[in-house]
Image (cartoon, helix red, strand yellow):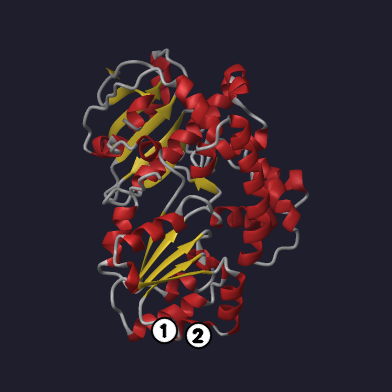
Amino acid sequence: MYTRFSSSNVREALTDTPVVFIMGPRQTGKTTLIHSLIQDNKPEDWEYITLDDQAQLEIAKADPVGFIRHLPDKRIALDEVQRLPELFVSIKQSVDENRKPGRFLLTGSANALLLPKLSDSLAGRMESIRLPTLSECEINNTEPTFLNKLLVQEELSTQDIRVRDHLLSRMVKGCFPEPLQRASEKRSTVWYQQYINTLIQRDIKDLTRIDHPEVMTKLLKLTAFYAGKLINMSELGNKLSLDRLTIKKYMGLLEQLFLVEQLPAWHSNEYKRLIKTPKMHLIDTGMMCAIRGLNRDKLVKQPEDFGLLLESFVYNELRKQSVWQDEPLSFYHYRDKDKNEVDIIIENAIGDCFAIEVKASASLSSKDFNGLKRFKSIAGERFKMGVLLYDGDRTSSFGDNLFAVPMGALWS
């Protein structure tokens, strides 16, 4: 079993917060995590209920208020709560009567906080914690230090160099626990194909009524070809014969299921020549490869595809590591009308900016830093550090606070 670094966040939240909500995609290990937490924390004090149990779901549907009110006088672990969002209001009523910390530990495979009215119903009573797919640090059981060092502008270095072969395998197998443990890339791909079909058919129905449920699978598959690129909603809609408003709604549902993320464009009030269109990233490269029919051999022969997958991989790894940071971090991409761009901009709470560019090859040239240099000039004093992650073997300085860093530093 993999060690989940988010478990410490959950344990800490249970000590002072009435409701703790672990949310993330299906099959990332939420149920495994809560069973582990229960076993480590007086299991006799807990009652575990899953709404994946159809009988329990029907009982709760019939009387949500009575279901919560008649729960045993224990700490309650309620799994897959997004299947019945009405329970959130009943949980609020129960918590208002008894605000004892750690009363409810919830999990959800959809971001129920985005559902109408639910974001306010438990305000001040609940802490939400993301459990994404496994990070490279968790897979390797190594302490995540990249973001810590970046944010205090320490030197970034690693002994893991020339990691292209490792990354090729990781791209195809992805970061979900189950396919990682399968014997071959082929068997991992089969898992992802089954996962996509089952999830769309099942979980979308729990969230909302939609006019074209069969389109959701097609849309998810289509997004795999747009990952790492600027989003064009009209173009997506045209390919599926849907209008802009409908495609925007459907994209929102994919985001709510933690399958797709939009990376907004960084902006500045002082500089007007900035592109404001967000980028799109899928949450897992294994899913992208399964959808697009990519395997290791094809990625070797198609370096452009590998480069786009690598950008998504790095973005996802940084987003995962940000969950464990004490300070909130915001993520953006940078692009201006002169076509200068930076793959990832990280901004802390006081507006300090850290820029990261991803390069798949081992060679370097000064022009690789053009985007970082342009962003540095636009951000001014807010710019603190720029990093070009590449498949090389040493950390090198390319000017004031600009560095080329081996890709392995991201997780080692």
| Viewer-side residue, 226 vs 36 | 36
Q: Residue at x 66, y 42 (%)?
A: 193
Q: Is residue 289 above or below residue 96?
A: above
* Proximity of marks 1 and 2: CB atoms separated by less than 8 Å: yes
Residue 361 image offset from top left, x and y in percent: 46, 17
- 10 Å neighbourhood of mark 1: few (<14), some, or many (≥20)? some
Kind of residue sitting beneath label 1: Gln
Residue 183 image offset from top left, x and y in percent: 55, 32
Q: Comparing marks 1 and 2, which lies closer to the viewer?
A: 2
Left or right of 135, for residue 310: right
Residue 376 image offset from top left, x and y in percent: 33, 31
Q: Residue at x 68, y 50 (%)?
A: 197
Q: Which residue is mark 1?
A: 93
| Viewer-side residue, 53 vs 307 | 53
Spatial separation of the CA atoms under disc 1 and disc 2? 9 Å
Kind of residue sitting beneath label 2: Val
Q: Residue at x 51, y 25 (%)?
A: 168
Q: Which residue is mark 2?
A: 65
Residue 111 image offset from top left, x and y in percent: 50, 61
